[in-house]
Image (cartoon, rainbow, N blue to C red):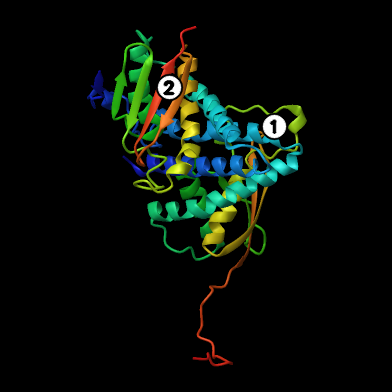
Amino acid sequence: MSRQSRRRSEKQQIDWHLPSTSSTGSAYHMGTELFILTYGTLVAQLCEDCEKDEDINKVLDKMGHNIGTRLVEDFLARSNITQCRNSYETAEVIAKVAFKMYLGVTPRVTFWNQAGDDCSLFLEKNPLRGYVEIPEKHSNLLYSNMICGILRGALKMVRLQVDIQLLHDSVNDDKVTEIRMKLMRRHKAVRTVEKEQKHPVGT
Amino acid sequence: MNKQEMADEALFQLLHIEIVSYVYKSAEQGEESGRCVTKLENMGFRVGQGLIERFTKDTARFKDELDVMKFICKDFWTSVFKKQIDNLRTNHQGIYVLQDNKFRLLTQMSAGKQYLEHAPKYLAFTCGLVRGALSNLGIKSIVTVEVTTMPACKFQVMIQKV
């Protein structure tokens, strides 16, 4: 016997379309919850597979890098951001637009150094850590290291080389996650130039 | 549908792809593909358990099995994949077939028979998701999936009578 599942108006009563700034915001969190829970299972699996925390951190970073290279296209398509003129703008865009869009939080950008290319992103409430408790034996685990990888991969695709480190992940009493970001240099655009042939191609 | 919602989808899809690729890469040393599928399914199971707890926090108690399956097809699928299951069939004896004609995790992969042999890798997690969701609703089941033409797929749920 077959049943067609009908789109009933009762579906509209479940308001999945609440904007993230609404006070009840719970509908928005539903979207990130899937991601948060999946990320948690991934880290749990990695803890089983790898012996050392450093290896786990590396794998998370590498996966983040792969995700970031693709995510940046999605980000640029959705956000219509124009080119940033300096590193301040870059950091602001990352904090205010990108983080907001994907994780629903806006980190604080502070601690700029003299040269203006080194800054810290402070996440008061790291959404990835929502349902997580890290046991003692994984004290060196940088749980949110994938975020660093994602930022690194994404910025690489827009030709910015960055050195990103997760300084504190909200462990134990530390409630704050801090990501240190240093913009190193711009990659030169690779242009294919017609070169003179030294040896003419034989017929 | 606002941009915020769809953004979450992209993030999850990319993470899912990376997880599949990681599990298969770390199994290169002589493990069979069956083990990888099991690993992915178990990960999905754990996520499904967590998700269903969140979703059903305020919902009324389910009347029967069919009610649970309808919830999965409509509300659960909408929350996770932003669309409903297109077709639900049952033989009223514990077997349900959920048909999704445009499965979100497969739409970007192919629209036909190309890469068909790779489809199971990307469906294992979702099978676990459904199994985990049902498990925390008190239903023990086995979930399998069948793909003949991407991106349509059929999830078959076999309820285990304890």
SS at badge 2:
helix
Picture residue at 49% right of the left edge, 40% below the top: A103
Q: Is residue A9 left or right of residue A124?
A: left
Query: To which chain does the residue with label 1 belong?
Result: A
Q: Is residue A129 visible?
A: no
Picture residue at 43% right of the left edge, 22% below the top: B55
Residue bearing mark 1? A48
Tell which of B133 and A8 is nearer to you.
Answer: B133
User: Callout 1: few (<14), some (14-19), or many (20+) C-alpha neighbours within 10 Å?
Assistant: few
Q: Amino acid at mark 2?
A: Phe
| Residue A101, position as x, y percentages in the image | 44, 44
Tell which of B21 and A121 is nearer to you.
Answer: B21
| Residue A168, position as x, y percentages in the image | 69, 41
Q: Amino acid at mark 1?
A: Glu
SS at badge 1:
helix
The nearer-to-camera label among 1 and 2 is: 1
| Residue B123, position as x, y percentages in the image | 46, 35
Have a look at marks 1 and 2 and say if they share a chain: no
**Mark 1 vs mark 2, CA separation in Å:** 28 Å
Tell which of A65 and A23 is nearer to you.
Answer: A65
Residue bearing mark 2? B55
